Image (cartoon, rainbow, N blue to C red):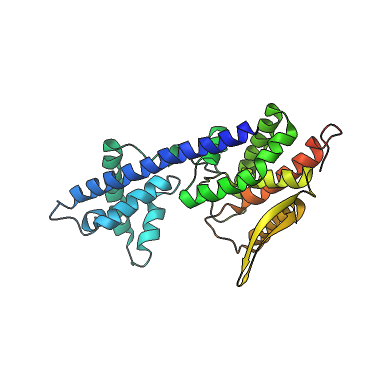
């Protein structure tokens, strides 16, 4: 029985539960805090957080979810259309820092700040925690579905808990390191959250160890609706290849960590083809 695979899924669900609770707490806390700011009847013209409660909450949320950004960068995101002078930017920066310091003293930080992996840090603990955390319900649902499509079979085939755990850790660490290396060539790098790097690694492992095994795929194209069986190597080549193409052409969704996808898939395949494919471990 693939106990470890199911345990990984369970941990992801538990972590997301706490993330969701943290989301609810943040919404309530930021709303209360920004509402209190509205009681300032004579705000400075540059104190935008006092003038607009919605904007106040959005700025607090942005600081919480992207602690790697400077206040000046956040100002540029929200006020790029305004021709602000250097003096106005300095005043606005001071107000935002002052309000956030008060908010931070009064309320706990969002849990995501302790879970995300920032590629500039090369933090091994965050490599693991970020893999078990997710951005929203659809993110975790998609990752769990694809993970369960490949990982349990890999765990059963390896027949060794330690070998399976080692494989998972190697994939997680390698995708994080690859993302860190990519910072040197990418214009922007977002904090990482999600199991997708490991999911793609499992897909690559599956293609290496069981290349001819058929995977059932649901196809819906206009009036063509059917379940078809596709060899594992073709399915892996399709997903990893598309992500590789998007990464090379720069056409992918910037919120998707394509580096983790591609490096995870390649690592999984090489891991299975070079290390795990032995006389003792016969491929299917």
Residue 123 visible from this viewpoint: no
Q: Residue visible at 46% across and 37% down?
A: 15
Q: Residue visible at 26% across and 54% down?
A: 49
Q: Point out residue 96 in the picture as x, y percentages from the top left corner.
A: 30, 49
Residue extending farthest to the bottom is 223
Q: Height in image: 169 above or below 234?
A: above
- Using the image as rendered, state which of residue 162 and residue 103 is in the foreground: 162
- Using the image as rendered, state which of residue 15 and residue 188 is in the foreground: 15
Q: Point out residue 190 in the picture as x, y percentages from the top left corner.
A: 51, 50
How many marks do you count on the picture? 0
- Using the image as rendered, state which of residue 19 and residue 96 is in the foreground: 19
Q: Quadrant of the C terminus?
A: top right
Residue extending farthest to the right is 279
- Using the image as rendered, state which of residue 75 and residue 205 is in the foreground: 205
Asked where in the image residue 165 lies, by quadrant, the reply is: top right
Q: Height in image: 44 above or below 202?
A: below
Q: Residue visible at 67% across and 57% down?
A: 217
Left or right, residue 236 beside residue 134: right
Left or right, residue 57 beside residue 113: left
Q: Quadrant of the N terminus?
A: top right
Q: Residue visible at 75% across and 51% down?
A: 214
Q: Point out residue 36 in the picture as x, y percentages from the top left corner.
A: 18, 47
Residue 143 visible from this viewpoint: yes
Q: Point out residue 186 in the picture as x, y percentages from the top left corner.
A: 59, 54
Left or right, residue 277 beside residue 267: right
């Amino acid at each position: 029985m693939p106990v470890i695979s199911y345990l990984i899924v369970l941990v992801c669900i538990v972590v997301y539960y706490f993330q969701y609770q943290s989301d609810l707490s943040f919404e309530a806390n930021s709303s209360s805090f920004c509402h209190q700011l509205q009681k300032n009847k004579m705000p400075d013209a540059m104190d935008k957080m006092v003038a607009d409660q919605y904007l106040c909450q959005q700025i607090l949320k942005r600081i919480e979810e992207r602690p790697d950004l400077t206040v000046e960068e956040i100002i540029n995101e929200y006020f790029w259309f305004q021709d602000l002078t250097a003096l106005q930017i300095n005043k606005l920066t001071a107000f935002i820092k002052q309000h956030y310091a008060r908010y931070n003293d009064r309320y706990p930080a969002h849990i995501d700040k302790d879970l995300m992996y920032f590629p500039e840090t090369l933090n091994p603990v965050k490599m693991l925690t970020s893999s078990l955390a997710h951005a929203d319900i659809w993110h975790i649902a998609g990752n769990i579905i694809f993970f369960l499509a490949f990982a349990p079979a890999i765990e059963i085939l390896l027949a060794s808990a330690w070998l399976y755990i080692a494989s998972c850790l190697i994939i997680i660490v390698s995708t994080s390191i690859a993302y860190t290396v990519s910072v040197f060539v990418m214009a922007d790098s977002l904090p990482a959250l999600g199991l997708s790097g490991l999911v793609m690694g499992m897909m690559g492992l599956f293609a290496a160890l069981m290349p001819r095994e058929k995977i059932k795929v649901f196809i819906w194209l206009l009036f063509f609706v059917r379940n078809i069986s596709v060899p594992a190597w073709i399915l892996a080549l399709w997903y990893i290849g598309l992500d590789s193409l998007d990464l090379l052409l720069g056409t992918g969704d910037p919120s998707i960590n394509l580096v983790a996808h591609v490096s995870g898939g390649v690592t999984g395949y090489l891991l299975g083809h070079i290390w795990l494919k032995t006389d003792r471990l016969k491929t299917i």
